[in-house]
């Protein structure tokens, strides 16, 4: 394939990953007209449409989705093979892309990656905050983070945190206006701050356990957020109850600003795990990062 053919494929990948001509052009460092010309050239070469464009959104056609699903892993493999040459250098280098929820990034990844990046200044880490469970190979990620270790085939899992206790919290001010819930079912009578996430197909129902039985409660309330830290701020403002990891809210529990309830029913979730493709060879940068993130039992 001619050199411009590869450029056109990279343009398609950028648009598929960003969902926008504007963001893709900025990512590639080209103008939007040049990007549009690349896509036209690709479609003329293939004889099929790969994108559907409207004034509000850009979507892949069936042919475009098929092409992206096939070529993203191949380009990622080529990039990793090129990065593996960095092992011949004195200093490890390369870019590592990780997808994780905001809680994992702030509470686990960043505290460990901060000293790691100071030790290896030629390594770049890109952290993408999202709640959707994604195909990391198809999206061009090097790794992802999720609770537990149930993974797709051909993935390696590495524990990076202890088990995580969830808790229901509300502000001290909130509980001057509303009674303490005595059972999870009482939450239906409370104002709760809800999480919208594509991982759960919409609004997340709060999960509890009783006598080793798991059940969920569908809650309602005046505020809906798509990330945990906005939910925390809403709870601190007295707008309702929140369902969050205990280590995330512990400073405000210690100060008395937040109050924890229903502790006996709140589950202990399996720790966060880093997962990544089971290739026979990884770059030195990836190997070093995995070891920096690995959880050891003596850690707090």
Image: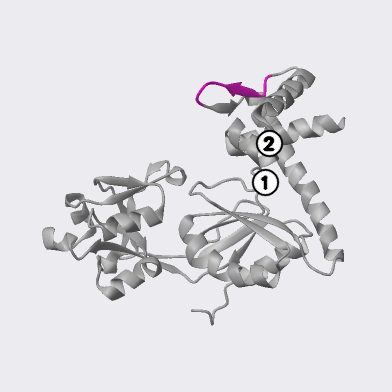
Residue at x 30% of width, y 75% of height? 254
Q: CA distance from mark 2 to mark 1?
A: 9 Å
Please tell me whether residue 253 belongs to the stretch shown in magenta: no
Residue visible at 70% across and 56% down in the picture: 95
Mark 2–mark 1 CB contact (< 8 Å):
yes
How many discs appear? 2
Q: Residues within 10 Å of mark 1 (few under 14, many from 20)?
A: many
Image location of residue 300, percent across then percent down: 48, 79
Q: Is residue 214 visible?
A: no
- Residue 63: image x %, image y %? 67, 25
Give the image location of residue 137, x and y in percent. Answer: 67, 47
Seen in the picture, residue 221 relative to 208 is either above or below; the reply is above
Mark 2 vs 1, N-terminal side: 2
Residue 156 placement, left or right of 162: right
SS of the residue under disc 2: helix
Decide if residue 77 is on the left or right side of residue 108: right
Instruction: From the image, give the main secondary structure of the stretch colored magenta.
Output: loop
Image colouring? one colour
User: Which mark is drawn over residue 140?
Assistant: 1
Residue found 76% across the figure and 43% down from its top: 75
In-front residue for pair 245/216: 245
Residue 13 has which mark? Answer: 2
* In the rendered image, the vertical position of residue 56 relative to residue 207, given as above or below: above
What element does badge 1 sit on? loop
Tell me if residue 212 can be seen: yes
Give me the disc on residue 208.
Answer: none
The answer to whether residue 25 is left or right of residue 8 is left
Residue 51 sits in which quadrant? top right
Q: Quadrant of residue 83?
A: bottom right
Give, as a single range, the part of the protein colored magenta: 49-56
* Residue in the picture at 58% in, 22% down: 53
């Amino acid at each position: 394939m001619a050199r411009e053919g590869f450029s056109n494929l990279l343009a398609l990948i950028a648009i598929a990953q960003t969902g926008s001509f504007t963001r893709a052009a900025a990512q590639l460092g080209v103008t939007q007209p040049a990007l549009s010309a690349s896509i036209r050239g690709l479609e003329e070469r293939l004889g099929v449409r790969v994108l559907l464009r409207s004034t509000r959104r850009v979507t892949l056609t069936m042919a475009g989705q098929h092409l992206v699903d096939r070529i993203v892993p191949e380009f990622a493999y080529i990039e990793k093979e090129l990065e593996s040459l960095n092992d011949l250098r004195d200093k490890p280098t390369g870019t590592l892309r990780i997808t994780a929820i905001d809680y994992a990034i702030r509470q686990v990844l960043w505290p460990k990656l901060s000293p790691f990046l100071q030790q290896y200044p030629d390594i770049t880490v890109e952290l993408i905050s999202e709640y959707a469970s994604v195909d990391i190979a198809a999206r061009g990620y090097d790794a992802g983070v999720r609770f537990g270790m149930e993974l797709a085939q051909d993935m390696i899992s590495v524990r990076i945190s202890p088990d995580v206790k969830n808790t229901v919290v509300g502000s001290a001010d909130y509980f001057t206006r509303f009674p303490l819930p005595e059972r999870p079912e009482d939450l239906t009578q409370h104002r709760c701050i809800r999480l919208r996430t594509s991982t759960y197909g919409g609004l997340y129902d709060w999960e509890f356990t009783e006598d080793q039985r798991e059940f969920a409660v569908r809650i309602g309330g005046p505020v809906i957020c798509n990330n945990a830290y906005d939910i925390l701020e809403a709870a601190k403002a007295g707008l309702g109850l929140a369902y969050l990891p205990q280590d995330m809210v512990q400073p405000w529990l210690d100060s008395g600003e937040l109050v924890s309830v229903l502790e006996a029913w709140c589950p202990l979730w399996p720790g966060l795990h880093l997962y990544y493709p089971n290739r026979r060879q990884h770059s030195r940068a990836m190997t070093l990062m995995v070891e920096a993130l690995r959880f050891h039992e003596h850690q707090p």
